[in-house]
Image (tube, rainbow, N blue to C red):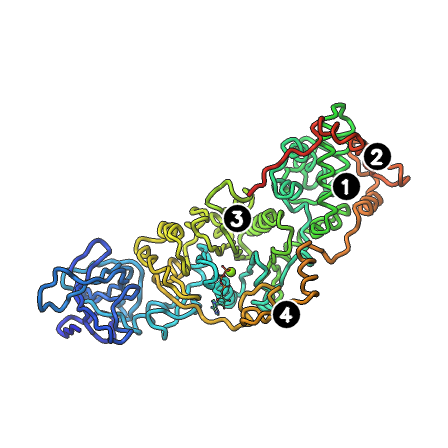
Amino acid sequence: MLTNTSQPAPAMASQIELIGRIISVHGSQASVGIPAMSPEGPEEKRITVGKFLGVAVGKTLLVGLITNVSMRPDAGAGALDTAVAELDLIGEIRTGDSGTTYFQRGVTSYPGMGDPVILIGPRELRLIFQSSGARMVEVGRLHQDSAIPASIDVDEMLSKHFAVLGTTGVGKSSSITLLLQQILQARPNLRVLLLDVHNEYGRCFGERAQVLNPNNIKLPFWLFNFDEIVDVFFGGRPGLEEEVDFLSEVIPLAKSSYAQQIGLASRIMKPGEGIGGLRYALDVPVPYRIADLLSLLDARMGKLENRASRMIYHKLMTRIETVCNDPRYAFMFENANVGGDTMAEILATLFRLPPNGKPMTVMQLAGFPSEMVDALVSVTCRMAFDLGLWSDGGAPLLVVCEEAHRYMAADHSVGFAPTRRSISRIAKEGRKYGVFLGLVSQRPAELDPTILSQCSTLFAMRMTNDRDQALLRSAVADTAANLLSFLPSLGTGEAFAFGEGVALPTRLKFKQLPAQMLPRSDTMGDDAGSGEQAEFDSRSLAAVIDRWRGRVTRPKQSAADELRAASVASPSLQPGAAPVAPAPAAPGAAPALDPNRFRLLRRPVDEVAGAGGIDRPEAPRR
Ligand SMILES: Nc1ncnc2c1ncn2[C@@H]1O[C@H](COP(=O)(O)OP(=O)(O)OP(=O)(O)O)[C@@H](O)[C@H]1O
Ligand SMILES: [Mg+2]
């Protein structure tokens, strides 16, 4: 190894051990002539890709990352520096006027030919990675020196969003658990909403998180905006145009109607057409009742002469009733005909306001009807953003989305547009309103690149697919792009961290999580992962079938009961424009639906089909 004590001491180098000299400089890249290493050399002194070198330039120590090492074909016989290391210069350690040394990103002075190059030691690494950011949290250890903690700047990471990317099984969910635990510790005022696609985080956060699933969540249908409720009514497929049109006409009327009944109309309705000359905008999240919606549709249908148009109304009403009566949708349609503005209560529960010692919500999506999960994610993310917007960022919230490529696919024809919109809004404007985004994906290449480009801290874990790597290459800064070629060689729980949250792009190993905190599917039980096959008896099988069929444990009121209850609650429901006949079956109980509204169904099926009565085949959305 070369040594040269005649060189001026750089700002920080703990011991000057010259390993080479600058032989060429290209912008922010430099080549260093170094001696070829013997394979027996100690690990910390080996010069190889991913390690940091320092270039002494006056009182400054430039910090560079080795991206390539090779032998020099042009080295003459007897030359000491027979190898060459390519360096990306990414920061510098400087000495301030007061004599204190500090690290800063970016390079202000560039090396010249022959400048001495040293291996960065533990002291410099500590200075770089433990810089005194206000809220640094330790998430693991550096690969270069496992004695040095890898710290993340929580504020920087949150405010500009972050993503954890990597192939399946490399430890993304475990890293997210670790990151969230640390973030919650560093930011006690932050609340976290974790969209748990595979129901695996239920026990990772212990007492700090409430776990929501279809059995304990209440998300009334009226919180869904128009696109979302159409998606629910149509089972995750695009709605039929005429039916959607009719729905768009009656939903504002149902809202106005309900507001009128409870005397809110004059206070919050907007001028426009509709009941009493006033009308709600389609997407305003105010309560309405399914009974009103059906009555309005029924009244409109009753006025029509044209049988084909009547059929459209009829199909729409049947569709709505079917979904409302589906026990899997009980969390949306329970009390659908009773009314009541529970928005404050729902927001308080969902977004932990106040946190009451549980600043986190784990929303287990796997138990919801799969065809409506997109709409559910859309409504949740939309409300998260709107809450931030209307509260002027008063209640900072981090939304973490697993399997992000499902909701924000690179191919815009895949997925549900409102979900994409909801999440994009958080990505683009969320930081202004204290709403932050954390994305997890095992298929970065399928993720919308514009969303990824909004994430300024990236944790890239093992990734073997070329397309995934290419996408990442376009998302990270040039200086870091070279590191991506290491991605296939990373171990489980290892990551390259890039961007605002870390001092320098670096390879790190996340801390080990205790077994009881590892994300794991609820159904896998405690033995899962231990290598032993859990006993699978007939009771387990019955439980599996129950889950499969989406059994909901809460008893659900029948639609007829609810309609009755609703009619008792509001006998004067009907708007003037939509008179409805009294129900013959229950004298005195109104509103009743037109008893003849199903008469078309009594016709022979082929006749109904001839009248356009059979559903058109609808293309599945994905
Ligand atoms: N930080 C860690 N501490 C302890 N074990 C870990 C850690 N990271 C990963 N593992 C191990 O790796 C396994 C897979 O990790 P994890 O479930 O987090 O991967 P993943 O990338 O989320 O996988 P998938 O793509 O299937 O969701 C874990 O069950 C655990 O055994
Ligand atoms: Mg996972």
- Is residue 161 shown left or right of residue 605? left
Residue position marked by numbered label 3 in the rendering:
407
Q: Which of the two marks, 1 or 3, is nearer to us in this view?
A: 3
Q: Which of marks 4 and 2 is in front?
A: 4
**Residue that appears at 36% across and 53% down:** 476
Q: Earlier in the sequence, mark 4 or mark 1?
A: 1
Q: Can residue 266 be seen in this view?
A: no
The quadrant of the rendering that contains the N terminus is: bottom left
Q: Which of marks 1 and 2 is nearer the N terminus?
A: 1
Q: Which of marks 3 and 2 is nearer the N terminus?
A: 3
Of callouts 4 and 2, which one flags the residue occurring earlier in the amino acid sequence?
4
Mark 4 or mark 3, earlier in chain: 3
Say which mark, if any, is on residue 21. Answer: none
Question: Marks 2 and 3: in contact by CB < 8 Å?
Answer: no
The type of residue carrying mark 3 is: Tyr
Mark 4 = which residue? 535
Amino acid bearing label 4: Glu
Q: Which amino acid, by three-letter code, is at mark 1?
A: Ala
Which residue is found at the position 80% from the left and 48% from the top?
558
Tell me how many marks there are. Answer: 4
Question: What label sits on residue 595 in the rendered view?
Answer: 2
Q: Work out how far the residue at label 1 is from the one at label 3, CA to CA, in angstroms.
A: 32 Å
Judged left or right of residue 432, residue 552 is right
Q: Nearer the viewer, mark 1 or mark 2?
A: 2
